[in-house]
Amino acid sequence: MIDTDMDSKEIKELKRHIYSLIYMDNGSITSNTKEELQWAFDNLKNIFEPYKFFLQQFVTNDKELQDKIDENESKKTSTEVKLLGMVWNRLDDTLRTRHLQLDIGADNKRKVLKSIAAHYDVFGFTGPILNRARLFLHKLQCDGSFDWDMKLDASLLREWKNICRQVNASPEIKIQRFVGRRNSQYRLVAFTDSSKDIYGTTVYIQEIDSLEVSFVLAKNRIVNKALSAKGIPSLEFQSIVLGSEVLIDLYKDLVGPACVTPLDIVELKLYFDSLFSLAWINSHVHKLEKQRPKFLKVCSNMDMQISRDDILNIQVPNPLAKPDLSALEAQNYQVMHDTSIAKVNEHLISPQKYSDFYKLVSVHRLVLKFVHILKGRLYKRDKVKYAHMKVTSTNLYTEAITQILRVDKDIHFADVKKYFSSCYVILTELRKQYCVPHYFSVVKRVLKECITCRKVKQRTIKLNQSPYREFRLEPPNIPFKYIFIDHLGYFQVKYQQKKIKVCILCITCLWSRAINLKICFDLSTVEFLRAFQIHTYEYGIPELCLSDLGSSLVAGANIMTDFLRDSDTQAYFGENNVKSTTFEQYFKGCHPLGGLVEVCVKMVKQLIHGSIKNYVLE
């Protein structure tokens, strides 16, 4: 349907758009002009009706086209229609959810959950209104004394009724469906924030040329038991992690390979208002200098509301409001260059000299302990020298840390590799310059990754593999023309109200590696011929049949070979251009076969055991 050769370039492009915007039995088409939309509508029937897909309902935000459709269909389309769980107003082109209506009569945990979960909001813009209700449910779930059907006490019922009245009285929130043209450039902007109970993020999309800002989605998370003991800085960082994940996932959905018509997103931005998180990120950002995060002192209203539970005086943000990004950038510049804020990238000792954070802390602790002991001894001997040492303690500390440099492969990789010798020779040279804890394992680990040492000193590798036969390398491209057969079993089954043992004939195709299984009552030649005959009726006569030296397989192959030598049979094969079957037997474990059928037999046994185990089938 999509790749029809006779279609024009425009029709093929239209089909690609339909394919990318179809969900279940609902589809959509977008265009930049009314003429393109009219042309697409005129070609829809020619695309679907030849395949017996009859289109039943059309809804568009173009009033002229909708009036024409209603006139042809002899019915009037309402102003608001359902669209993927949302309500779409086709005249002003806005989306909204169904009106929030919590069940004020819910008196147990099950009904409260049902009332909250009944509201569907894929974009999350009603999250601030439902935050108190979700926190109330979270409190009930954390209380182990409440069962699902246990009636709530009077104080909890009063709290729930207050929440329901406030939520049910909230106004409807609408967002614009249209965010911009597909041929424009965009940037994604995310804001994150956290409170003691909830942390969340909000994502906007901004068109580069017109600077139009549109709301995309908002997500929040309730602080669980694992994070309940954390402080606000840790929760702020959790919101940053959530914002980063949502931002990257949204970017992949809009630009990734799964998107048929990707957007041109040229920039991703993440804003947050935590100095602690900024300092922590900057202390680890030396590996990602080009991706240093931005910092803003004031975020948008939406991300502040998405992490709060106070809706008594809530002011629902306007998703269409343009945030003054130029003012935000200027404020960002001022904050980042404020002299009152410490420069977190300036360290007394560079953390890059250590392989991990725990080594850095351990070395600093030992050095501080050593300096403290020196101070104590010097204070007892000479207080004047102690005062001088107190002034220069920073230099002493820095010098001590430098002397106890921990060698890591990323730092002194070249120092270890330049000798290309044994561990002991390299250790002799390194000890002249560094103090290396765990010296032998460090040098040995680095030498394992040295390409020159591996080429010179390691043993050569000889592949334990025999050359494959011709039938294994180039089989005909027809299923079950070249096959390999083998028995597996026994398995217990019920037959005529009795338990009997049966085996399975495993037939595998050398080209497609497809497997055909046939049940045999035993390993006799008669049962093998019966199973092979059923396979032949289904897939035709094979040209080459390989097997091991099983007695029933060899005897059955001889019987079939004698039968196929008959003059009438050979004449029939010649008239219909059919090649006679050739049987070849190999001893078990023959290397030229390369484990051809053993792997298939093992897989079949695992699948049978994984599906029925020891159950006896009838």
Image: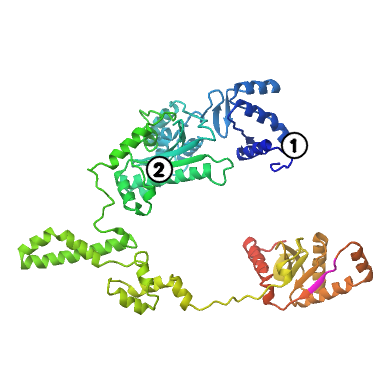
Asked whether residue 145 appears in the rendered view, the answer is: no
Vertical placement of 164 versus 478: above or below? above
List the residue tagged with mark 1. Answer: 52
Vertical placement of 139 versus 173: above or below? below
List the residue tagged with mark 2. Answer: 222
In the picture as drawn, the residue positioned furthest to the front comes out as: 418
Image quadrant assignment for residue 341 = top left
Q: Position of residue 600 (x, y in %)?
A: 67, 67
Q: Position of residue 388 (x, y in %)?
A: 9, 61
Q: Which residues are magenta?
A: 579-583
Image quadrant assignment for residue 104 = top left
Q: Are marks 1 and 2 in contact (CB under 8 Å)?
A: no
Quarter placement of the N terminus: top right
> Could you say whether the residue bearing mark 2 is in a helix, strand or loop?
strand
Vertical placement of 422 versus 383: above or below? below
- Between 446 and 246, the one nearer to me in the picture: 446
What main secondary structure does the magenta stretch of the protein show?
Answer: loop
> Could you say whether the residue bearing mark 1 is in a helix, strand or loop?
loop
